[in-house]
Image (cartoon, rainbow, N blue to C red):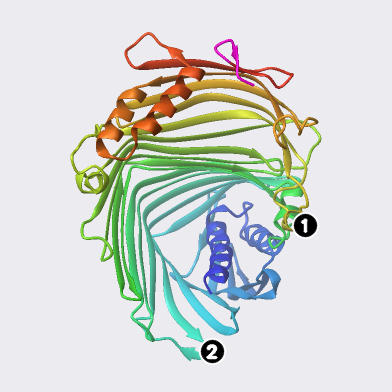
Amino acid sequence: MTAYLRRATGAALLFVSTTQMVNADVTAQDVWSDWKNYMTSVGYDVTGTEKASGDKLTINDLSMSMQMPEEEGTISVDMSSLVFTGNSDGTVAVGMPGTVPIHISGQDGGDEFDVVVNFTQSGNSMVVSGAPNDMNYNYTASQIDMALASLMVDGEQAPADLARIVVTLTNIISSSQIKLADMRDYSQRMSADSLNYDVAFNDPDSDEGGTFQGSILGLSFQGGGKIPLEMNTADFPAMLAAGFAFSGAYEYASGNSSAEAKGDGEEFSYSGSSQGGRLDVAMDASHVAYDVSQKDTAINVTTNQLPFPISMEMAESSIRINAPVAESNEEQDFSFALKLGDFTMSDMIWSMFDPGAVLPRDPATIALDLAGKAKVLVNLLDPEMAANLSGPPGELNALNIKQLLVSVAGSKLSGTGNFTFDNSDLASFDGLPAPKGTATLELIGANGLMDKLIQMGLMSDSDAMGARMMMGMLAVPGDGADTLTSDIDINDQGHISANGQRIK
């Protein structure tokens, strides 16, 4: 049921987001009409009874339902009433019930299930202002909760302790601007004091179970995008082709999480914390980009398979991906970067392979920063194209190694490089596009590290001798002690030279 619930939950969250981002006009009727048009355009069937009284419009017995992808089930949202009230200053107040049930039903693996998740707001206010095609939404709430209310499997109510899901946001402030033309253009700012989650499961037919808890403090979001006036949310490639686009930045000040799980005689516990992070996401029909970073991360893991806990810390971690996804005969830019900065492990982990503390236990760092150009030969976001792929999905045309850094156990490898690739020549390098370019490398502390590995018994004298001979062929002494440098050049004839000496 897990994969299905992920898709269903995504559809539910789409509804939740519209409570802060729907289009509106200055009258109650126009606010409701556009809300209904928007929900219909993203796939919901909307029913309800309208009752107007002066500047107030009440929608009674409101129901919004959507067929899930591949007809695996339905999701529905039911409200006793939704009230739009025109204010004397030309704004419109939107009132929702305190609790709104989100109903998800379907089949998974032959089992029929029925889930109800309650969406609850307290201390909330939503006021809409602006012109018919340029609206501003201001939303506040002291607390928002999403909680599992009931779960039925094959027509039977599941035990109360089978599963627990509670997600809570506190002190939410959100402002949105929505412009309506040939697309819905929107921009939004949101902040919340905290996001807390509490998830648990317990299999009554076995000893399997677990709990997952955590909190994120100082949460904020800023972003926007474009939404087609009509789109099929079940056909993601078509949505992108119609102009759907999104970009946003999420930040948080600190966070912590914990988990405990057991099953098949094994027990596991985890705790982690960080002192802030950021997630940037962007997507449109031509590219997908992610940029995730986190500061001062600490992780502790215990398991009955090990006699001691596993503890690790990292001052900085990040990953950045910017990839073209649209089919094109033109070269497109891409980039990838990874950094694990100042990584440390507990002495107990070190003692597993270095009980004598022979190796320096300085913080380790791994960093890689790449950029380049490539041709995308298929639409990478189209599942049918991906499933029927018979050859490589693209061609690598250029690669710029902006940074390579591996610093560990008292040694350091660093370098840069720049290469182009001839995709018409797949013979010179055993099926790979023939490269042309230069890389510059520096290696510090390699001989000292090998001496220590020999002392530990992890490397033999003969292995070290072979490695030193290879380094002597490819590198020359640098300015400092135990330092080697190397300039590797590959020309358009496929010849490889190291420091001016041809090696291939």
Q: Quickly name the residue at label 2.
A: 154
Residue at 57%, 58% (x, y): give it. 18
Q: Is residue 327 left or right of residue 275?
A: right
Residue at 54%, 12% (x, y): give it. 499
Query: Which comes sooner in the sequence, label 2 or label 1?
Result: 2
Label 1 SS: loop
Q: Which residues are magenta?
A: 498-504
Q: Is residue 473 left or right of residue 57?
A: left
Q: Which one is in front, 293 or 412?
A: 412
Identify the mark at residue 388; answer none if there is no mark. Answer: 1
Instruction: Tell me the quarter of the picture where residue 11 sits.
Output: bottom right
Name the amino acid, label 2.
Answer: Asp
Q: Which one is in front, 135 or 275?
A: 275
Q: Is residue 447 left or right of residue 155?
A: left
Q: Nearer the viewer, mark 2 or mark 1?
A: 1
Residue 242 in sight in this render: no
| Image spot of residue 197 (x, y percent) | 36, 62
Instruction: Tell me the quarter of the picture where residue 490 sits.
Output: top right
